[in-house]
Image (cartoon, rainbow, N blue to C red):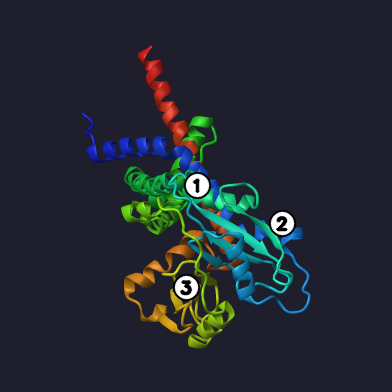
């Protein structure tokens, strides 16, 4: 009598149900994630006529643009300048943090501005295809365009995907070395053998990458479990309180305080309790670490209020600083990005082959019953 491996049976049952529950979302997250690997490049290619500007003298002061945005959008929780290292022919890109008091919307906006004329080139919310389809995909990847409930859903699917990966490891553990040593050959006999072999082979090869992608995605979105964060989103943003000090002067003060910092993101405060922040990597910092270095400026006094260096942080904070690069693949140039595009498509392929395997099993049971 054949001995039943209850661990494997349980793992197979969990693997099947987790795949069925999260399959379509896995496919959507994988497709959108692959598209986002080249977010900036694709966005600038699609909107080249809009985002490429003609330099005419010196760019306008940052403070002028900051206050222009503040007048255009009088109720913001903050503004982020996303490309402080923009080329001379490149429009400035800003992320607008909004709050309409509804948890059903993820309140992110964007604005592109010609730095020489101050002309607004595009302005809108990430929940809309216009002003930027690529940025719509970005917000879809975070929240399925369903606001905070969607963000929580995406975080939960990160957990189900990790569980699905681990149960798959239990089911196919005997094939791992065989797949890695190319001992398993694909059978192209029919759709049943193709789907079965693809699911096994692709699942093994994608095992490590799936754990990295799913875990880092979950970890970066774990704030969606914070009830205080949800409560804050139910209170609409009050009227802007812009900085007393010049944004240009605060920027220069931050640069002087940490001269080896490469500006990557500039946070411009629009509320009284917020600070001006300059963040980015250091000149000798590994691309595996995402920022971790910040200079904060008091917007009333214009003086440095806080400085943080990744080198001074604890081990876990340094590990966490690698999560964003590992999730998006921005640490190794074009070859790594192309690899991440392929990696992003693998979960979708696994969801399709998994669904085919499930259908084969259901059909087999139906035929046996009849």
Query: Which numbered disc, 1 or 3, marks the residue closer to the eye?
Result: 3
Q: Earlier in the sequence, mark 1 or mark 3?
A: 1
Which disc number belongs to residue 291? 3
Which one is in front, 50 or 289?
50
Q: Position of residue 317 (x, y in %)?
A: 35, 71
Dot 2 alpha-carbon crowd within 10 angstroms: few under 14, some 14 to 19, many 20 or more: few
Which disc number belongs to residue 47? 2
Q: Secondary structure at mark 1?
A: helix
Quarter-of-image position of residue 157: top left
Q: Position of residue 152 (x, y in %)?
A: 39, 47
Disc 3/disc 2 C-alpha distance (Å)? 28 Å
Above/below status of 350 relative to 292: above
Q: Earlier in the sequence, mark 3 or mark 2?
A: 2
Disc 2/disc 1 C-alpha distance (Å)? 24 Å
Q: Position of residue 134 (x, y in %)?
A: 61, 52
Q: Position of residue 147 (x, y in %)?
A: 46, 46
Image quadrant where one finds the N terminus: top left
Q: Secondary structure at mark 3?
A: loop
């Amino acid at each position: 009598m054949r001995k039943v491996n209850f661990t494997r049976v349980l793992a197979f049952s969990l693997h099947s149900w987790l795949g069925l529950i999260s399959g379509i979302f896995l496919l959507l997250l994988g497709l959108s994630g692959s598209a986002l690997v080249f977010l900036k490049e694709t966005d600038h290619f699609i909107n080249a006529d809009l985002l490429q500007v003609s330099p005419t003298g010196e760019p306008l002061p940052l403070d002028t643009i900051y206050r222009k945005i503040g007048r255009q959008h009088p109720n913001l929780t903050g503004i982020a300048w996303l490309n402080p290292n923009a080329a001379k022919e490149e429009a400035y890109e800003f992320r607008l943090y909004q709050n309409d008091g509804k948890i059903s919307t993820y309140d992110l906006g964007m604005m592109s501005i010609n730095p020489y004329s101050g002309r607004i080139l595009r302005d809108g919310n990430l929940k809309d295809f216009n002003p930027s389809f690529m940025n719509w995909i970005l917000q879809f990847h975070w929240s399925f365009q369903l606001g905070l409930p969607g963000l929580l859903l995406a975080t939960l699917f990160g957990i189900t995907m990790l569980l699905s990966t681990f149960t798959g490891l239990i089911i196919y553990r005997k094939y791992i070395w065989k797949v890695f040593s190319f001992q398993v050959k694909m059978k192209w006999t029919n759709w049943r053998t193709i789907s079965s072999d693809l699911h096994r082979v692709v699942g093994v090869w994608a095992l490590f990458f799936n754990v990295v992608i799913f875990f880092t995605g979950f970890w970066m979105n774990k704030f969606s479990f914070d009830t205080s964060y949800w409560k804050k989103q139910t209170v609409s943003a009050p009227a802007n309180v812009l900085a007393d000090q010049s944004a240009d002067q605060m920027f220069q003060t931050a640069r002087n305080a940490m001269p080896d910092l490469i500006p990557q993101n500039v946070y411009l405060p629009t509320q009284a309790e917020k600070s001006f922040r300059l963040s980015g990597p250091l000149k000798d910092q590994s691309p595996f670490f995402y920022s971790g270095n910040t200079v904060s400026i008091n917007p009333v006094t214009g003086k440095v209020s806080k400085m943080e260096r990744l080198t001074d942080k604890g081990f876990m904070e340094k590990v966490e600083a690698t999560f964003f690069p590992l999730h998006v693949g921005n640490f190794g140039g074009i070859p790594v990005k192309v690899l991440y595009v392929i990696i992003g498509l693998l979960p979708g392929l696994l969801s399709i082959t998994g669904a085919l395997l499930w259908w084969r099993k259901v059909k087999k049971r139906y035929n046996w019953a009849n």
